[in-house]
Image (tube, rainbow, N blue to C red):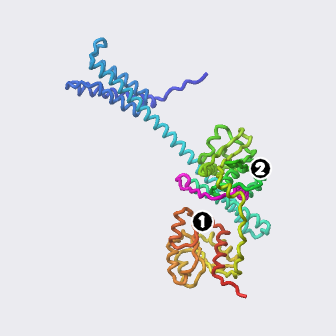
Amino acid sequence: MGSIVLPRPKAVWFTYGQPLLLLTAVVAIYVLFLKPNGLDAPFSLMTVPVAITAFYHGFRPAVLVSALGGFVIYYFLGLNWGHIDTLQQLRLGTYFIAAMLICWLGNQRLSSQQKQAQLTAATERRKDDFLAMLGHELRNPLAGISAAARLLAHPGLDTRDMKQNANIIHRQAAHMTHLLRDLLNVSRVTRGQVEIEKAPVELVEVMQTAVEQVRSMVKHREHRLVLNLPVGPVWMLGDKTRLVQVVTNLLINVVRYTPHKGELTLTLSAMQDQARVSVQDNGIGITPEMSGEVFEQFVQVKRSTDGEKGGLGLGLSLVKSMVEAHGGQVSLHSAGLNHGSTFSVTLPLRATASASMTTPQPEPEPEPEPVTEAKSLDILLVYDNPDGAQPLAMLLRFEGYRVDVAHSGQGALRQAEQRRFDVAILDIGLPDMDGYTLARRFRAIPQQAEARLVAVTGYGTAQDDARAFYAGFDQHIVKPIDCDLLLDELQQVAQRVSPALTT
């Protein structure tokens, strides 16, 4: 037998007791103050407790007060139901119509408030879950980086172990970079600031680039990745960077949610007017009720303490946004839990693009550049964090550059007044002045007027780029620093400042 749940006394009092007390107060005011002075207005007066009850207590209490208000009107007017004149009928009918309308409006208001409260609670709960997962996802790579860095300082470490720990640091840093990129991208998508720059894109090359980006994850989890790609090129008009991100995020998702030694398949097929990309796995699958929610922000199919799973719940929402921005669609099919999943993306193939690009003409061979002697550049590295400055300075010295290090703006200016530098790498966040101010003051020193200025910052929006270039920087690099990008930049500077060898 089911148990009988009695309502709480406080709830009963709030729902029905307060409205009845309000009705009693209105009747008392009429009897004590209005009726002795000859004022006869119970019809309009009774709508006051009905309105207050409807807007603060809901539909049923308001209907009860409306009915009791009708009884009060009948009692105080001494109405004879068999001999009610037309005016009284009109007033009484108007009262009940107005009372029912007020009850309905009050119910609509409370329903809207309840829905908003539920939505707010769900949003807060999702935000808390996201922050918890963000902390979890950031702590995991940081733990690996911290342990590997500690081992690198161990005196008994051999060359093989050093390489292994260096690979761990590189892999975990790349994972954190991916997390930060997703966070920034989802923020831009939410504000409608993501721009799709369409140009001819070869989709087979997009697939191969995405596979290279996740190859280390696939190898680490011992998955078998099968590629089904067309023999010839498949062209479309799109943003190559965004399309690579779409396929990469899909692959990362199936890698995370497929147990070790799983089977993954990436397929690209082209029809007359559209291309279809499918990513299939034999992983944990998904329930039918969750299929429509996985492409929403911060939604995760399964929570796990396994650091390889989880993520921030952003990757698939970004996939949906990027695909739709290209005029395509994304879908998911799964036979249920433990039966794997298949993500499918359809993209339009423009006839004008494909017709003109199916047989690309070979580019002419570039003329050989004159042989130059790379100069050992004089570099000033300004970095407020010694733990960040030391390994970067060591790397640059290993590459043959002469590097001076400063940890503040004033220290950098003192060194700039003493000697000339070819390149200055300036951290934007410094303890005594920001990097923009330092760049302007650095440029004002006559012997540094021709130096190449490189900004290093943790902020990577378009406004940050513009602000850096307005301050006089020649290059803007976002943390964590892409060392290959920085070394390429320095190599180009070295070739420009070095005279060609003469024979």
Q: Which residues are magenta?
A: 187-213
Label 1, label 2: how many angstroms apart (C-alpha)?
Answer: 34 Å
- Residue 8, placed above or below residue 376: above
Q: Secondary structure at mark 2?
A: loop
Residue 324 x/y as whole percent: 60, 49
Q: Label 1: how many residues lie within 10 Å, few (<14), some (14-19) or many (20+)?
A: some
Q: Label 2: how many residues lie within 10 Å, few (<14), some (14-19) or many (20+)?
A: some
Checking the image for residue 244, the label placed there is none
Residue 12 x/y as whole percent: 45, 28
Residue 241 x/y as whole percent: 64, 58
Task: State which tag comes first along the sequence, 1 or 2.
Answer: 2
* Residue positioned most to the left: 37
- Residue 75, placed above or below residue 347: above
Q: Amino acid at mark 2?
A: His
Regarding residue 313, the answer to whether it shows in the image is: no
Quarter of image, res 215? bottom right
231 magenta-colored = no
User: Which residue is identified by label 2?
Assistant: 260
Closer to the camera: disc 1 or disc 2? 1
- Residue 216, placed above or below residue 103: below
Q: Residue at x 43, y 35 (%)?
A: 109
